Structures are given as structure tokens and as C-alpha cells.
């Protein structure tokens, strides 16, 4: 079953009744990066979502959504995922003591498949890209007692992701970011971040939305003013691999001060490698796309062109993380792109 109307209560105001009801995400650190600040020529703060359970921000929204659905009596959760959303759903269901079926594209690495199985999830592989896996997930969720969990496209998921901004507000007090940098895949993180910024009184803060070419569904939609479906996902940043961005993300692009930037896979991988050297943290290419906003000079270029005012506050980068990465995979990506 597809749930379209779950009664909402702000995730940051939830009153928990038991240990099982506690949020599955953690409050992550906000730290200054001296290396990135030096490159950017302005203060850069890192919101370290890469240290969340299962390694990404996804647990905020999906964990919150799964908790609400479990209270509605659903007994099996079906999620389609390129990796991180499925891991978040499997983790949440493991905590709730409920079964999960995760439908992944056939390109999903065996390490991710094994992590899902270790969490007790049933794993089904279907199709070349996420969209094909998603179609099967919808079908499987039609079984009695089952419910579909989108990896990014639901208001309750966005509500969970908005807690990132409430934490930023608590950490920064009266200071506002000069700009906020996010990676965009299906658009769930962007939708949550935009909602949170309105809620804390930061609607004027520019959002820098980063995508890799070949997974640039938001940028493509902005270019023509409506949602568009990419013919294929050709980027190595598979976790940005939705061929169509969610409608709410496109609305956010129209309602907010948003700058859409695309980078190539080489820039994303270079950013991953530099971040590992600078901060001793290994993240996915999808996260590298966000980090390349500074490492490849895009923010600096926007300032020089007058398309982004010199920030009065720090640039905040959401380090979205990701579990589909290892040193050997990083080397494989470099070899594939001729970067050896």
C-alpha cells in the first residue's frame, strides 16, 4: 500500500513513550573545516551526516516515517533503494522488530546487499536503475499488511530530514549560514532542508544544489521548468540515480534562492579523495558532488560572477555520507575514469 496521508507531528517535537520510540538518528556534529575554509576563502562548516547509523542522512526521514507507519499497524515494509535508503529502512525495521523487503537495482554492490541481509532484510534485485526497482517495490507493497516506503518522496520523510536544519539553528544561534550546500538525488534531502529553513527563519539563505552529470534530474527539470525523466543514469554516483526528481524538490527550486550546479564524475571523485586527505573521512561520490562545490571552485566562481553574494555567514556543507564506498571502490572509480 502507498501511504499518502500520514498524520504529521514535527519530528523535532516528538514526545517519546518508550525506548523503541526514540529517534533512530543521532544529533551530528557541526565542525569547521580548516582545509575547505582555506580553499573557499571563507569559513566552511561541515554537518557530518556521514556518521549517522548506516552512514547517511537517510535515517532521519526514513526512520521517522517507519516509526509512524509501524504505529498504524503495518507489518511489512517495502523500500526501493540504490543503497542508503534501503539501509536506513532495514535498520529502522530491525529496531522495530518488523520485516523489511528492500528492492535494489542489479548494479548494487554485494557489500550493500550483504549489509542489508545482516540487518535481517529480504533483498530483491530488479532492473538496471532505481526506477525499475521502484516499480517492483510498489507491486510488492500491494500485499496485505505491507506498505511502500519511498526513499525520498513523502512529506513525513522530508519532515524527518528537516531536523538537520533545526540542529544547525541550535548550533549556530543568531548566526545564519551564508549558503547551504546539498547533494541532490531524488530530492528528499532538498525538500527537507528547504522546509526546515523556512521553519527556523532562514528562507533567504541560498541553497547550492549539487548533482553529477548523468544523474542531474533536478538541473534538467529546472532548465525546462517542469519534471523531466532522464533517459538513463550514466553517472557513477548511483545514489544520485533517480531519473526523475520529486515534484516537491522542483517547487523548492522555484520558491527558494537556489543555485543548481552540475559536476562531472571526475570532479566528484577528486572531491572524495581530497576530503579523505583533509578530513580523514571516506564518502560516496554522491557526497563528493556536494564537496566539489568548494574543491572545484564553483562557489568561488559564483561569487566572482555576482551570482552568489559574498557570504556574511559560513558556508555550511551537508556531508551526506553514504555506505557504498571503500578504498578499493574509490580506486576502481579512478581507474574507470582514467584518473590513475
Image (cartoon, grey):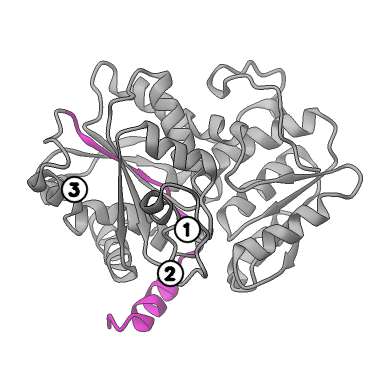
339 is within the stretch colored magenta: yes
Earlier in the chain: of badge 1 and badge 2, it is 2
What percent of the width, then of the height, locates residue 123?
74, 63
Instruction: Measure how far apart labels 1 and 2 are at the Cα level.
Output: 8 Å
1 and 2 marks in contact (CB < 8 Å): yes
**SS at mark 2 in the image:** loop
- The residue where tag 3 is placed is 299
Instruction: Measure how far apart labels 2 and 3 are at the Cα level.
Output: 22 Å
Q: Nearer the viewer, residue 271 or 149?
A: 149
Residue at the image point whose x is 46% and y is 28% from the top: 195
Magenta segment: 313-340
- The residue where tag 2 is placed is 235
2 and 3 marks in contact (CB < 8 Å): no
Q: Quadrant of residue 252?
A: top left
What percent of the width, then of the height, locates residue 14?
61, 18
3 and 1 marks in contact (CB < 8 Å): no
Tally the marks. Answer: 3
- The residue where tag 1 is placed is 240
**SS at mark 1 in the image:** helix
What percent of the width, then of the height, locates residue 25?
55, 36
Amino acid at each position: 500500500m502507498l501511504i499518502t496521508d500520514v498524520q504529521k507531528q514535527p519530528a523535532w517535537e516528538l514526545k517519546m513513550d518508550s525506548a523503541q520510540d526514540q529517534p533512530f538518528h543521532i544529533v551530528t556534529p557541526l565542525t569547521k573545516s580548516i582545509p575547505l575554509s582555506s580553499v573557499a576563502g571563507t569559513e566552511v562548516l561541515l554537518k557530518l551526516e556521514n556518521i549517522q547509523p548506516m552512514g547517511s542522512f537517510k535515517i532521519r526521514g526514513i526512520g521517522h516515517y517507519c516509526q509512524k507507519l509501524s504505529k498504524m499497524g503495518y507489518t511489512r515494509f517495502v523500500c526501493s533503494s540504490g543503497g542508503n535508503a534501503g539501509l536506513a529502512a532495514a535498520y529502522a525495521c530491525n529496531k522495530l522488530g518488523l520485516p523489511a523487503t528492500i528492492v535494489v537495482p542489479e548494479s548494487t554492490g554485494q557489500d550493500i546487499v550483504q549489509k542489508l541481509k545482516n540487518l535481517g532484510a529480504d533483498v530483491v534485485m530488479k532492473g538496471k536503475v532505481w526506477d525499475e526497482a521502484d516499480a517492483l517495490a510498489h507491486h510488492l507493497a500491494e500485499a496485505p499488511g505491507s506498505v511502500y516506503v519511498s526513499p525520498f518522496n513523502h512529506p513525513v520523510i522530508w519532515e524527518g530530514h528537516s531536523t538537520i536544519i533545526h540542529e544547525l539553528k541550535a548550533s549556530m544561534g543568531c548566526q545564519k549560514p551564508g549558503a547551504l550546500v546539498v547533494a541532490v538525488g531524488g530530492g528528499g534531502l532538498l525538500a527537507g532542508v528547504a522546509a526546515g529553513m523556512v521553519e527556523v527563519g532562514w528562507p533567504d539563505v541560498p541553497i547550492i544544489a549539487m548533482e553529477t552529470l548523468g544523474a542531474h534530474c533536478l538541473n534538467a527539470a529546472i532548465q525546462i521548468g517542469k519534471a523531466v525523466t532522464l533517459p538513463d543514469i550514466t553517472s557513477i554516483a548511483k545514489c544520485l540515480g533517480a531519473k526523475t526528481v520529486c515534484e516537491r524538490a522542483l517547487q523548492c527550486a522555484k520558491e527558494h534562492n537556489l543555485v543548481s550546479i552540475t559536476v562531472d564524475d571526475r570532479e566528484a571523485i577528486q572531491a572524495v579523495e581530497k576530503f579523505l586527505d583533509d578530513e580523514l573521512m571516506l564518502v560516496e561520490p554522491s557526497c563528493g558532488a556536494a564537496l566539489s562545490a568548494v574543491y572545484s571552485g564553483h562557489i568561488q566562481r559564483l561569487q566572482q560572477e555576482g551570482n552568489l553574494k559574498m557570504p556574511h555567514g559560513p558556508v555550511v556543507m551537508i556531508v551526506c555520507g553514504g555506505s557504498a564506498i571503500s578504498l578499493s571502490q574509490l580506486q576502481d572509480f579512478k581507474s574507470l575514469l582514467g584518473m590513475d
